[in-house]
Image: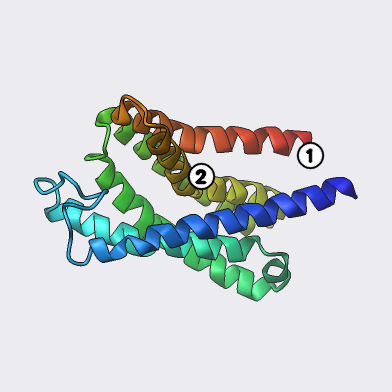
Amino acid sequence: MRYHILTAVLRWLAVVLMLRVLVTILANYPDYFPPDFGSLFLQGREATFAGAYRAAFYVHILSAPLVLLNGLLLLSERVRRRGRWHRVLGRVQVAVLLVLVLPSSVVMSRHAFGGWPAGLSFLLLSVATAGCAIIGVAHARRRRYAEHRRWMLRCFVLLCSAVFLRLVSGAAGLIGVPSPEGAYIAAAWASWLLPLAGYEVAERRR
């Protein structure tokens, strides 16, 4: 009983934290319409903010919050019990993820802050997220729902790397690390490897 209470509390704390970070991300959107190159994310990107990168940037910032919020709905037990709604939201999730979010992320990774080490992290993250989603869908089609749930949970953990990245980067900024670029590279890798490792450990203990 204590274990279930603790996991429920931690789950709600994670939801509140995610929503708080998401609100902070959305609060920066006025800097992007039109692009303000004095803002934190776009600073120094005048040369690269054109062509494919510009299109990928806007596709990404408009579609990524959708998959985070929709992912939270798909984790809800109430939605999962309503099989039809779960299937509809799941199809929307996978379609937006594979068609919009991940391809735009791959394009943006070429010009990531921190250079190719951070860009490689984001590229591998996109590949891993797509792989988890595709495997999860394959299990659902074969009615292997336990495996489907595990792989889609992995997918959502990887999606939450965006939240973890901002938390780590923000903490590094508050501490005043001597090398912001190096700290960002470390955060880029830790943002998805550490949560994924934590999920795998928790899954095996369960």
**Which of the pair 197/8 is nearer the observer?**
8
Crowding at dot 1, Cα within 10 Å, few <14 / some 14-19 / many 20+, comes out as few
**Place of residue 82 in the rendered image (x, y in percent of width and height, measured from the top left):** 70, 74
Q: CA distance from mark 2 to mark 1?
A: 20 Å
Say which residue label 1 marks: 206
In the rendered structure, find residue 14 and report the number of the disc placed on it: none
Say which residue label 2 marks: 158
Quarter where residue 101 is shown: bottom left
What residue is shown at x 51% (from left), y 49% (from top)? 160
What residue is shown at x 43% (from left), y 45% (from top)? 166
**Place of residue 1 in the rendered image (x, y in percent of width and height, measured from the top left):** 90, 50
Q: Are the residues flagged by discs 2 and 1 in contact, CB closer than 8 Å?
A: no
Name of the residue lying farthest toward the front = 175
Element assignment for label 1: loop
The quadrant of the rendering that contains the C terminus is top right
Name of the residue lying farthest toward the left = 47
Q: How is the image coloured?
A: rainbow
What residue is shown at x 47% (from left), y 45% (from top)? 129
- Say whether residue 157 is left or right of residue 129: right
What residue is shown at x 38% (from left), y 37% (from top)? 173
Q: Is residue 161 above or below residue 25?
A: above
